[in-house]
Amino acid sequence: HNNKKNNNKNPHSNSPLNRFASPRPHYDDDDDDETTTSTPRAYRHLQEACALVQRIEIEANNAVSPPRRNIRFRPGQCASLTDRDTMTEAFSRHLRRTYKACPSVLDNNITLPALNNKDSQLIQASWVWFDAMWKELDSRSLTYSSLATTRFGAFPCLPTLDVHYCSQLRRQSRESMISQLLNYATQLEEYARDAEYACANVIALLKKSFQEYGVDPPPLPSPIPLTSYPLDYATPQAICPPWGLRVMEALNQVQVWVDEGTKANVGTPPGAEALAHPSSPSSDTEQFLFGKKSESMMVHSTQLAQRSVSAVIQAFQQQDDEEKNARLSRKNNQVMDRLAFMKKHQMMSVELLDTCTSDIAQKAASNLHARTKIREVPLLKWSVVARNSTGTCIVTAHHIVFVTQNIPLLGSMGGEKVVKFNLKKDIDSFEIQESTAGILGALSVVILLVDHDGREIFSFRPSTGGTRFKKFLDVLLSIASENKSILSS
C-alpha cells in the first residue's frame, strides 16, 4: 500500500471520517515499514464498524435513549439506504457531525479505529478485503439492500435459506442456550453448596460432643458425579441430519412460502395495463406505477425474508430448549440427591447423640433433668445473654433451654432461671436482628424465636458466632419437624 501524499486543500480531506466515507480510502502516510497490520487488528476494526452501524440504528429507533441527532437526508435523497453511495455519504456526514476522535486502538483501547488519525493504517489494511467482500456480495445480490431489487427466493437465488446461514443461526441459538443453561445450573449449584456448608457447620459444632460421649460420627456421603446420571435426550441432528426435524420442517415451510409468493405474483399494480395502449399516461405516471410495484415487491420480499429467518430461529430454539430441559433435569436430580444425603447425614448425627447410652451421655442427661426437668442428651451448649442476664443455651434434639443467673438484689435471693421451648410445638422459625455495633461488640447479633402465629416469644444474644449458631438452630428445627422415615431410606 504505497500511496502518495494527498495535497487536497479540503478541510475534511485529512479527517479519517472523510476517508471512511470514500469508496476507496486514501491516507496521508509517509512510506514507512509499518504499513502492514496484523489480522487481529483488522478484525477488531471490522467489529467496531459493525458496532457503529448498530449504534446508529439504536439511536434512530429507540425512543427511550437520550435524544441525539439522527441521520438526515437532503430533499430528493433515498431515505431507505438502499443505494450504496447514499448510505456511505449519510454515515460519513453523521460521523463528522456527531462523533469526536477516540483513543487509538494502538494503545490497547477498544474503540472505533476510524475515529483516530493514528489508526489510518488499520483501516487501510482492512479496507482492501472489506471492499472486495462488499463488491462480491453486492454482485451476487446477497446484501440486505438487494431485497429491494431481487425478490427473496426467486431464481437464481436459493428457494430457501443458505446452509451456511443456517449454521450461523444454529451456533447463535446454541450459544444462547448454553448461557441460559449455565445460569440455571449455577443457581442450583449454589443452592446445593449452601446446604453442604450448613451440613459442614453441623459436623464442626457436634464434633466435640461426639468425642466427649465416645460416639463415632456417621460417615460422610460420597459425591456422585453428574455424568453418573442418565441424560434422557437424543440429538436432533443425529435423528434427522443435518439440522434436526423441526428445522427441516421450517426450511420446507420457507420453500412453500416462496412458491406461494411466486404463484401469487405480487405483480402489476392497478392501472398498469393502460401503459400498453397508445393512450397510455405520461412517463411520470409510468414511473409512479412501476415504482409502486417495485415498492410492493420490496415490502413483500423483506417480510418474507424476516418471516423465514424467524421460523428457522424458532425451530433451532425449540430443539435447544429440549436439550436444555433434559440437562437441567439431570442436574436437578443430582442436586436433589445431594440435598437428601446432607439431610440424612444431619439427622443421623442428631439421632446418634440423642440415643447415645454411654455413661458420660447419660450423666449429662441426668444433670439436665435435675435443672430443667427434661431428660435428653445435650447436643450443644452456647454462652448467651438473655433478658439482661448471662447464661447458657442448651440444645437437645427436641428442646432449646435457656439457663440464666438471677442477679441477687437487696432482700432477694439469687439463683437460676430456666426457660425452655419445644422445637416442634413452640417454635416456627429463628430470625436474626442485627443491631449497630456498640459497647457489646460481638454481641450485636440478636436471635429471635418466632412462634407459629408469627409472634416473637423470646430473644437472646450469643456470645460469639451468632450467625453460625443460628444456622445450626435452623438445621435442628428442620430435623425436628422432618419425617424420621428418611433414616431408613
Image (spheres, rainbow, N blue to C red):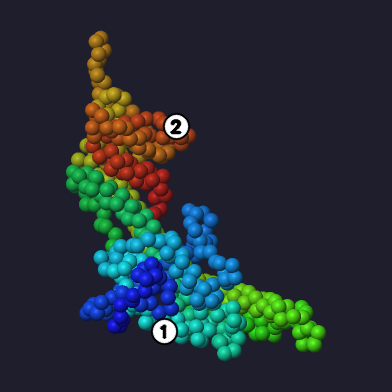
Q: Quadrant of the N terminus?
A: bottom left
The residue carrying pointer 1 sits among few (fewer than 14), some (14 to 19) or many (20 or more) residues within 10 Å by Cα, namely few
- Amino acid type assigned to the residue bearing label 1 in the image: Ala
Tell me, for residue 155, which label it has, or none: none
SS of the residue under disc 2: loop
Q: Position of residue 237 (x, y in %)?
A: 47, 81
* Residue displayed at 53% across by 61% down: 61
- What residue type is disc 2 on? Arg
Identify which residue is drawn at 32% across, 44% down.
Answer: 471
- x and y, in percent, of residue 461 in the image: 29, 32
In depth, the one of 192 and 290 nearer the eye is 290
Q: Which mark is residue 132?
A: 1
> Which picture quadrant has residue 185?
bottom left
- Viewer can see residue 352: no
Image quarter in which the C terminus is found: bottom left
Q: Secondary structure at mark 1?
A: helix
Q: For the residue carrying disc 2, how many other residues have a C-alpha within 10 Å: few (<14), some (14-19), or many (20+)?
A: few
Residue 262's place in the image compared with 77, above or below, is below
Q: Which residue is mark 2?
A: 455
* Figure quadrant of residue 46: bottom left
